[in-house]
Amino acid sequence: MNNKVVFGQYFDTNSWMHRLDPRTKIISLFLLMIGVFLIKNLYILIGFFGFVLLLVLSTKIPLAKFLKSLRMMLFLLFFTTIFQVLFNKVGTKLASFSLTMTVLTLSISVILLISYFIIIKFIKKFKLLLLIAFMLMSLYLQSEVITTRVLFNYTIEVYSKGLITAGFVIVRIIALILISSLLTLTTKPTDLNNGLESVLSPLEKIGLKTSILAMMISIALRFIPTLINEADRILKAQASRGVDFKEGNIGQKVVQIISLLIPMFIVSFKRAEELANAMEARGYIPGEKRTKLYVLQFKTFDYLSLGFSILFIIFGIISRGYFANTV
Amino acid sequence: MGINFQEVSFAYYIPRKKRLPINFILRDINLHIDFSGEFIAIVGHTGSGKSTLVQLMNALNLPTTGKVIIDDKVITAKPKFKLKNIRKQVGLVFQFPEYQIFEETVLTDIMFGPKNFGYSLEEARERAIEAAKIVGLEEELLNRSPFTLSGGQMRKVAIAGIIASDPQVVVLDEPTVGLDPKTKEELLLFLEKLNTEKNKTIILITHDMDVVGRFCKRVIVMKKGQVVFDGPKNELFLREDLKETYNLDYPEVMQIMRNIRNKLNIDLDVCQYTAYDAYCELKRKLGDKNE
Ligand SMILES: Nc1ncnc2c1ncn2[C@@H]1O[C@H](COP(=O)(O)OP(=O)(O)O)[C@@H](O)[C@H]1O
Ligand SMILES: [Mg+2]
């Protein structure tokens, strides 16, 4: 097999975190995530954030990999910030801008908005930065130009609480994303699955079949590349029968999709049946106890990490009592 | 009129970083295939790039460098025209029919191709019925669901689905694998008929040297992404170093003829591909001697 498609984001640098037991990572990082929410003090939170950054650096994974998952959340961050800054009216007033919407500035703003949408068609990068730039331009115009007919006046007021809450939200979300990326970047999907199975195994006692679930996940992981290959073949087979996926009206589109879906189902079911037979032939019984080829084993470093995370959580809880809601 | 490969190299993936090497699956392919009357076998090890090569012939794969000229349309890495017409001229049948069969009845499934290529519903139906007849599907099967058919029948449906669009070239990727001997024989015979009576070019990928010997005229041997032999089959099979250079076997009948020739040390025309031809040749040469 030389068409190995690696799934998930796993990036191998063989750092200390890569070598940790997946269970350690799942539990510790889960504890850290809880910690993010426990901390109520902005300075402690920033200190904690620094710690997460140190963890990130210690994995030796290029930062671009982390930034990639951050980028997806940019819009969310952006809007929560805007909302907090604009609408949170608690605390001391820090600044206020009075703005005037006139016919001229309104039309210019609209033009700016339209040109933004045209420009992002051509410039794929820095969309968000562009949007911010355009909005600032529009706001600036409204604070300066008052010559033509005035439509309405309004003021934007920024309060301290709004800024702080925005800061909290930003740091928390970024920290959460970094922590979850730490897990997915340093753990292979299969290890992650094994770890989860083991961590969740107490749930078997209350009747949840976590081992079957884990088996399903690992089979799914194994078959994603295979099914992508099959989909590619089906696509080609139909293309050589004259299906042109780039064109067609809605009716034709429906037929095109059916012509892909039905073979996809047939092939998947066939694969599933073959696999089920092969598994049964090798003695797999769902839910029955199985031994593992690679037994997960805690090492000293795992105990250290776990101990540290637990200490950290305790610290987080105590810190609420001492520094509660300061700033 | 035909398919022309000019210095074609092909890679499935081009790494985004410029300095990484490109993993070329095919390298420096030069070929000419006529639109009429050829019967070509493509042979070679698994993974040598046979399937990749035939997918370049109907623009399912686009050349990474070099060009493929089909009819007189030049296909490069980024063609500026619709590729559909090319796929009508060069029909490609994949190995596994389940990758393409999806309609409710055999007939509508065979009609799917012609309909896509712009034939009217009536024309498509006529062509489908004719194609079904050519591949030897019984009439009562036409209204059955294709999924109730046997593997061999399904493959016939898949082939009919291609030849119903009346392509000039029919390319088949390992069409005989997993078929029972009778269906295999039928399939090869109607391909031969298509070749001789309708003057279509047939290209098939196969590992079966007996099939190559009996049916094909020209052989293309692939090795590690390159064409290492391209010529008439007799020229290939007359080589003494077939095993060493190309890792290929002689057709069974020919192997026997070679053994007889070497044992008896007589002048035999060893290029015989059926038992009957071999018998005639032996009778001609040995008969003389015995008398
Ligand atoms: N869709 C694909 N994506 C990436 N690599 C592929 C794909 N199809 C085939 N290959 C690779 O191309 C090489 C040649 O494959 P193929 O053309 O199928 O050979 P053959 O048909 O002679 O067995 C193989 O190394 C295979 O792994
Ligand atoms: Mg192949």
Image (cartoon, coloured by chain):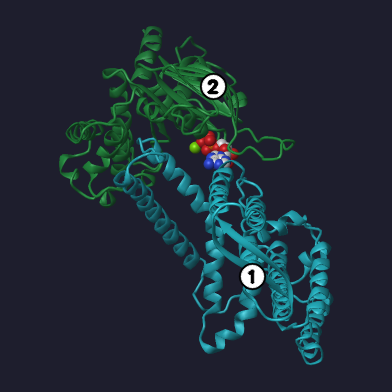
Chain colours: A cyan, B green
State the residue position of label 2. Answer: B67
Q: Which mark is residue A118?
A: none
Q: Secondary structure at mark 1?
A: helix
> In x, y percent, where is residue B193?
28, 23
- In the image, ligand 1 is in what quadrant? top right
* Picture layout, residue A62 above or below residue A282: above
Between the C-alphas of marks 2 and 1, the distance is: 59 Å
Of the 4 image quadrants, the one containing the N terminus of chain B is top left
Seen from the viewer's position, the closer of residues A299 and B268 is: A299
Q: Residue at x 58, y 43 (%)?
A: A119
Image position, residue A77 (x, y; %): 65, 65
- The chain containing the residue under callout 2 comes to B
Which residue is drawn at the image coordinates 77% and 55% (left, top)? Answer: A62
Chain letter of disc 1 in the image: A
Q: Tell me the crowding category of disc 1: few under 14, some 14 to 19, or many 20 or more residues within 10 angstroms, Cα based.
A: some
Percent across and percent down for residue B61 are 50, 33
Q: Can you say whether A93 is above or below A268 in the image? A: below
Amino acid type indicated by mark 2: Lys
Front-most of residues B215 and B154: B154
Above or below, comparing residue A161 to residue B256 in the picture: below
Q: Nearer the viewer, residue B19 or B268?
A: B19
Secondary element at image label 2: strand
Which quarter of the rendered picture does the C terminus of chain B lie within? top left
Foreground pick, B119 / A39: A39
User: Which residue is label 1 attached to?
Assistant: A86
Residue A311 makes an appearance in the image: yes
**Amino acid type shown at disc 1:** Leu
Q: Give the class, few, some or many, for how many residues have Cα within 10 Å of label 2's Cα (few <14, many ≥20).
A: many
